[in-house]
Image (cartoon, helix red, strand yellow):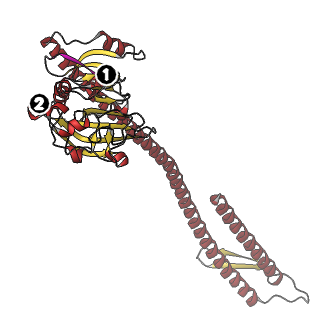
């Protein structure tokens, strides 16, 4: 558009100038003819100029003034010289304008190339952005694949250990129930026999339903049934104690607490020796779930939990509290030995159950089951003997409705299906 306007303006300017020049020439020609007639010049052989003038006749039969005509001729020659100079200047101007026009065309071409390059740059930017997006997605997929490979390696390691132990101990096998559950994950299986060391190892090998399973507490030992919680806080919990309805009495002897008693589907104590064997294999955490008679739920979590062997009276090691309940266990009972009523420990006799007593307790989850929660003094008891968590209501005379103690490997990592 700018090119067309420039060309039109240039042509118009030249045309106007040529029209003015012709009019000026015509006017002077008419004036010369009127005053001095027609005249012409001729170059002679000797190089001199010959001027011949045809003089018009004027009224009154007077001849024109030759000197005046000569002056007119000189003026006209001078005027033509100036017009010639103007024409030359005009040609130079036209040349300059043409050169400028070529420059403008060149600039327009450069701009067109740049505009085309801008589109190309935008395309390149979009491609780079797409590549970055694909790279991000690829990195995410690689992380998922790495996690999947890590889980497969863990399962392979467990299976390798399982096969090795299976060769050493013919009483330990991979059960048909476990294989069936892997083949039919939607089916319900409440019992499975295998050579796992706790519920965490069961979880890592694909068992994700709460229920009773068989684990091996010691290499070459007798398989032991345990109750697994595969739902609470990611699962993998081995339950070591449960109180829920008072159907099982906990006023038991040292030997009974050592071996365990009760029913895995109801109330039970897993057994001090079993708890020791599990926690002596590695680092374990403890979770205690509590419920009162109004339906309120709280829990206490302890980062580190273990008990020592029978020679050390199954001494308690527990620390690292967190949770929604107030701590009434670790801060007061840590490093205390286990006692039962018949061992001569006065607190155990008063409380009618085995526990890690210390003058006597701030918590006792193996006490007498009292329905309704509240129980009174003066009924012949020497002191509080209910299922007590002192921090619940800041009293020893409130017995909880449900409690459970469960342990899990501290290194437990929640398995996420891909």
Decide: few, some or many residues near mark 2? Use Cα within 10 Å; few <14, some 14-19, many ≥20: some
Q: Which numbered marker is on residue 246? A: none
Which one is in front, 395 or 120? 395
Q: Quadrant of residue 67?
A: bottom right
Please tell me whether residue 222 belongs to the stretch shown in magenta.
yes
Q: Helix or strand or loop: what does disc 2 sit on?
A: helix
Badge 1 or badge 2: first in the primary sequence:
1
Which one is in front, 113 or 255? 255
Which one is in front, 82 or 212? 212
How far apart are the alpha carbons under marks 1 and 2? 23 Å
Q: Quadrant of residue 346?
A: top left
Which one is in front, 83 or 229? 229
Q: Residue at x 30, y 23 (%)?
A: 227
Residue denoted by label 1: 264
Residue denoted by label 2: 310
Residue 43 is at least partly visible in this image? no
Q: Residue 72 in the image: x percent, y percent?
A: 73, 85
Above or below residue 219? Residue 413 is below
Q: Main secondary structure of the magenta part?
A: strand
The residue range painted magenta reads 221-226
């Amino acid at each position: 558009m700018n090119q067309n306007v420039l060309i039109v303006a240039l042509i118009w300017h030249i045309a106007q100038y040529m029209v003015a020049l012709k009019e000026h020439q015509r006017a002077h020609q008419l004036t010369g003819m009127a005053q001095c007639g027609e005249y012409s010049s001729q170059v002679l052989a000797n190089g001199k100029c010959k001027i011949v003038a045809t003089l018009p006749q004027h009224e009154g039969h007077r001849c024109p003034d030759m000197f005046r005509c000569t002056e007119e001729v000189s003026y006209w020659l001078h005027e033509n010289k100036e017009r010639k100079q103007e024409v030359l200047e005009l040609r130079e101007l036209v040349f300059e304008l043409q050169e400028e026009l070529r420059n403008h065309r060149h600039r327009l071409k450069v701009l067109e190339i740049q505009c085309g390059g801008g589109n190309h740059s935008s395309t390149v930017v979009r491609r780079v952005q797409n590549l970055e997006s694909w790279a991000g997605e690829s990195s995410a997929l690689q992380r998922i694949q790495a996690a999947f490979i890590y889980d497969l390696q863990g399962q392979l390691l467990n299976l390798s250990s399982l096969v090795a132990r299976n060769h050493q101990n013919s009483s330990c096998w991979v059960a048909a129930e476990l294989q069936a559950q892997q083949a039919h994950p939607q089916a319900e299986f409440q019992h499975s026999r295998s050579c796992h060391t706790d519920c965490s190892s069961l979880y890592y090998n694909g068992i994700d339903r709460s229920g009773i399973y068989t684990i091996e507490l010691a290499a070459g030992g007798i398989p032991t049934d345990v109750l697994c919680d595969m739902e609470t806080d990611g699962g993998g919990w081995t339950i070591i104690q449960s109180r829920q309805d008072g159907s099982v009495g906990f006023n038991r002897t040292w030997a009974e607490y050592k071996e365990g008693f009760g029913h895995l589907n109801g109330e039970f104590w897993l057994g001090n020796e079993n708890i020791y064997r599990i926690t002596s294999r590695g680092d374990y955490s403890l979770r205690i779930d509590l419920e009162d008679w109004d339906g309120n739920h709280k829990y206490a979590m302890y980062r580190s939990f273990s008990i020592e062997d029978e020679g050390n009276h199954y001494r308690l090691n527990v620390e690292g509290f967190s949770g929604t309940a107030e701590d009434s266990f670790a801060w007061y009972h840590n490093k205390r030995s286990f006692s039962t009523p018949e061992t001569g420990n006065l607190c155990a006799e008063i409380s009618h159950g085995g526990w890690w007593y210390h003058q006597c307790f701030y918590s006792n989850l193996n006490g007498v089951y009292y329905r309704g929660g509240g129980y009174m003094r003066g009924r012949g008891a020497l002191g509080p003997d209910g299922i007590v968590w002192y921090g619940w209501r800041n009293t020893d005379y409130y017995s909880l409705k449900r409690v459970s103690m469960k342990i899990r490997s501290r290194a437990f990592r929640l398995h996420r299906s891909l």
